[in-house]
Amino acid sequence: MRITQISIFAENKPGHVTAPFRLLADAQINIRALSLADSKYFGILRMIVSDSKKAAELLKEAGFLVKVTEVVAIQVPDVPGGMAGVMDALNGTSINIEYMYAYPFKAGEKAMLIFRFDDPDAAVRKFQEAGITVVGQEEL
């Protein structure tokens, strides 16, 4: 199970992430999760949205550099040690986490973790073997 993520590369200047948000809002595309990472010269805005195909086309037409990737989403209990249990499922494997980000799903109950792996299929298998819920696009 994989979900589609859109990444936008933008100059690291004030106001440069406002335009993508406005474009998506005007097109009635909902942002489900996001992460913004920066360096001295550019930023990477990663998003899970309600209509990734439409969002990618719209953003490309507006001149943004857009990359579409597949990521893995899982549910984790929103309790102390919830993250440790997730990491335990991957312990002892050669699966590399390229990056990850999280957002609350139901405050105090569940959180959602989004991962980019070098081997997503192996990661999904390990999570499922450990009884961790892997989430599909429609569930977000």
Image (cartoon, rainbow, N blue to C red):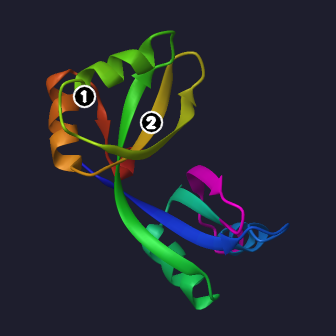
Q: Is residue 95 left or right of residue 113?
A: left
The residue positioned 34% from the left and 23% from the top of the image is 86
| Image location (x, y in percent) of residue 65 | 56, 80
| Residue ID for mark 1 | 90
| Image location (x, y in percent) of residue 27 | 64, 74
The residue positioned 57% from the left and 31% from the top of the image is 104
- As drawn, the residue found furthest toward the front would be 40
Q: Quadrant of residue 26?
A: bottom right
Q: Is residue 26 magenta?
A: yes
Q: Is residue 16 left or right of residue 87?
A: right
Q: Is residue 22 above or below residue 59?
A: above
Q: Is residue 6 above or below residue 57?
A: above
Q: Which contiguous range is marked in magenta?
A: 25-42
| Residue ID for mark 2 | 113
The answer to which of marks 2 and 1 sits earlier in the sequence is 1
Q: Is residue 81 above or below residue 125?
A: above
What's the amino acid at mark 2? Leu
Q: Nearer the viewer, residue 46 or 54?
A: 46
